[in-house]
Amino acid sequence: MRTITLANGETVEVECLSCALVNGLIEPEGGVVMETEHFHAHQDVAYPIPGLIILASKRHLKSLDELTEEERIDYITVLAEIRKAQRNVLGIESVYYFYNEDTTHHFHTWMVPRYDWMYAFGRSVESVRPALLHARNEMNDEANLKSVRQAISALTEELER
């Protein structure tokens, strides 16, 4: 078991955070943005950036090549639908996608929007980590969290159409 501190400061004991989220043992703050037979998408509120989505497989696996053909089709379809909603309802023009296999979690992809304020940290992929930390440490106030929750609602509504 691992002890994990959630964005709201609560701690939970879980073997796998992703499994706990996709199986409904832990409710992501703001709720589920989209869910299919194979995937679960939610806002990562540990980094309060509107539209920062984590797309996680429901099945416990670590690598893209472990997805079945049906899961691969679902993955790219869901990824594209979320990206289209980010652009259409949140005006997000650029996104960084991160997926790594050396994690203690299971297969998931981060969809990190690129906002103008982030350019203060640079323009390359290397600027993303400082921007995420800035959001966590400097933007974790109620006004910004409200805009994050509004983004979650807008994306969820768009994706339910």
Image: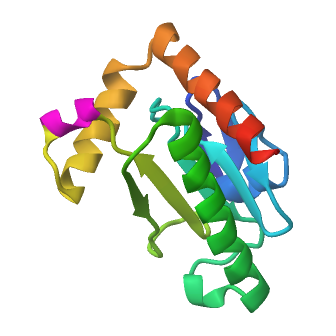
Q: In which quarter of the image is the N terminus?
A: bottom right
Q: Which of 107 and 38 is in front in this view?
A: 38
Tell me which residue sits at (14%, 33%) in the image: 120
Q: Would residue 15 be visible to someone looking at this image?
A: no
Q: Which of 21 and 115 is in front in this view?
A: 115
Magenta span includes 94: no
Is residue 82 rendered to the left or right of residue 25? left
Tell me which residue sits at (60%, 63%) in the image: 79
Q: Is residue 10 above or below residue 61?
A: above
Is residue 10 rendered to the left or right of residue 127? right
Q: In which quarter of the image is residue 19?
A: bottom right
Q: In this view, does 115 lie above or below 2?
A: above
The region drawn magenta spans 116-120
Q: Is residue 147 above or below residue 112?
A: above
User: Residue 2 at what x, y percent from top left?
Assistant: 62, 51
Tell me which residue sits at (68%, 52%) in the image: 41
Tell me which residue sits at (57%, 15%) in the image: 146
Q: Nearer the viewer, residue 30 or 18?
A: 30
User: Residue 52 at what x, y percent from top left?
Assistant: 50, 42
Q: In which quarter of the image is the C terminus?
A: top right
